[in-house]
Amino acid sequence: LAGYPLSLTYDVPLYLVTIVLGLVYLGGHLPGVIAPEPYTRFIKTLPRNYVLGVVLTLAAGIWLTAITATGDLGEMSPMRGTLVTVWMVGTVLAVIFMRVFLAVRGVAMLMLLGVGVMLDSAFLVDSNIRLVVTVLAYVWVAAGLVFVASPHLFRDLLDVAMKNPADRKSTRRDSSWP
């Protein structure tokens, strides 16, 4: 690991991060507009999709390992090799033993890792869009922490979001309010 350049920053410009975020959101929602029925079926099976969970969790584990292997760890630098090993073994063990809702955890881990790129790109930039990216990053942090710890909440959120508007019943006493 001695030959790797140590850098904890990503050096990704803010405009590129906003373009990638836009493409991620577009790619996540456009299939639902084009083919709503197959997309709805896929989204309903997403939380328990083990194959997708393996891919997402391995991607997050590799990303975390790369950050640990190349980043400045300060006082933890002497433990770099141990940490890299722990992250890789932990990723493999997570894939083996956390089979339930693995896709949700994988998405949440990638969200938490993506926050670093988002905040790094917005740091010391004189543009109003940095505020949008920063707020979105903190929303991702909150959602990522909740979904890693309680992935069943993601499933419940999808169940509510995927209901037909006609099937949604008002729980309020006064349902005349728009």
Image (tube, rainbow, N blue to C red):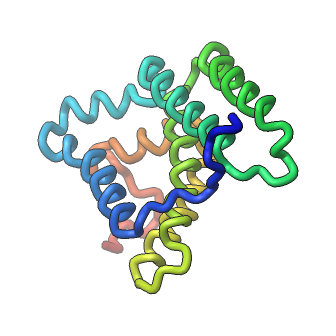
Picture quadrant where residue 127 is located: bottom left
Left or right for 10, reference 2: left
In the rendered view, does 119 fall on the left or right side of 129?
right
Tell me what residue is drawn at x 63 percent, y 55 percent: 8
Residue at x 62% of width, y 54% of height: 7
Residue 170, x across and y down, in percent: 40, 57
Residue 6, placed above or below residue 3: below
Residue 166 visible? The answer is no
Q: Farthest residue in the front direction?
A: 3
Rendering quarter of residue 93: top right
Residue 43 percent across, percent down from the top left: 34, 34
Position of 31 relative to 21 (above/below): above
Is residue 27 placed above or below 129 in the rendered structure?
above
What residue is shown at x 32% (from left), y 53% (from top)? Answer: 25
The image position of residue 53, as x and y in percent, is 48, 25
Drawn side of residue 118 relative to residue 7, left or right: left
Q: Would you identify the image quadrant in which residue 116 lies?
A: bottom right
Residue at 20 percent across and 47 percent down: it is 30
